[in-house]
Amino acid sequence: QVQLVESGGGLVQPGGSLRLSCAASGSTFSIYAMGWHRQAPGNQRELVAVSVSGSSTTYADSVKGRFTISRDNAKNTTYLQMNSLKPEDTAVYYCRMTTLVLGKVNHYWGQGTQVTVSS
């Protein structure tokens, strides 16, 4: 089992920046992917960015060049640096970590943190 705790959301003006953090505890040795998703009211949850161990990162087209995902494996933490924020980035952001144990994949979700971009 993996437990996730997110932090860093809030209200920011258009063009501003925020950094989200997601710290994992528990069976962290088995984590091989760390990522962020978001869900705006009335919309489905969508992938924002994901970092896979030993592989490249992937970003949604809508955030490329503005958002950066990073990870500190020693701290079992992933970060999402969000720059040049737009009102359409307003959503609840969820971190997700994926483990692989004996060939079985499990996904774990954070509790979600609200990001609101508004003047």
Image: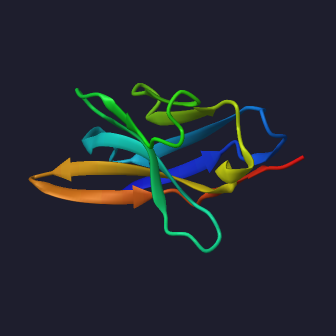
- Reply above or below: 15 against 2: above
Residue most extreme to the right? 119
- Reply above or below: 31 against 17: below
Q: Quadrant of residue 21?
A: top right
Residue ID at (56%, 69%): 43
Give residue 28's position: percent from left, percent from top.
34, 42
Residue ID at (49%, 64%): 45
10 left or right of 30?
A: right
Residue ID at (80%, 39%): 14
Q: Quadrant of residue 91?
A: bottom right
Q: Closest to the observer: 21 or 115?
A: 115
Give residue 71's position: percent from left, percent from top.
45, 29
Residue ID at (52%, 41%): 23
- Reply above or below: 59 against 92: above
Report the number of numbered marks: 0
Q: Closest to the observer: 76 or 43?
A: 43
Give residue 83's position: percent from left, percent from top.
67, 30
84 left or right of 109?
A: right
Residue most extreme to the left? 103
Q: How is the image coloured?
A: rainbow
58 left or right of 89?
A: left
Q: Closest to the observer: 74 or 35?
A: 35
Please state, as top left, top right, bottom left or bottom right, where the N terminus lies in the image: bottom left
Give residue 29's position: percent from left, percent from top.
28, 39
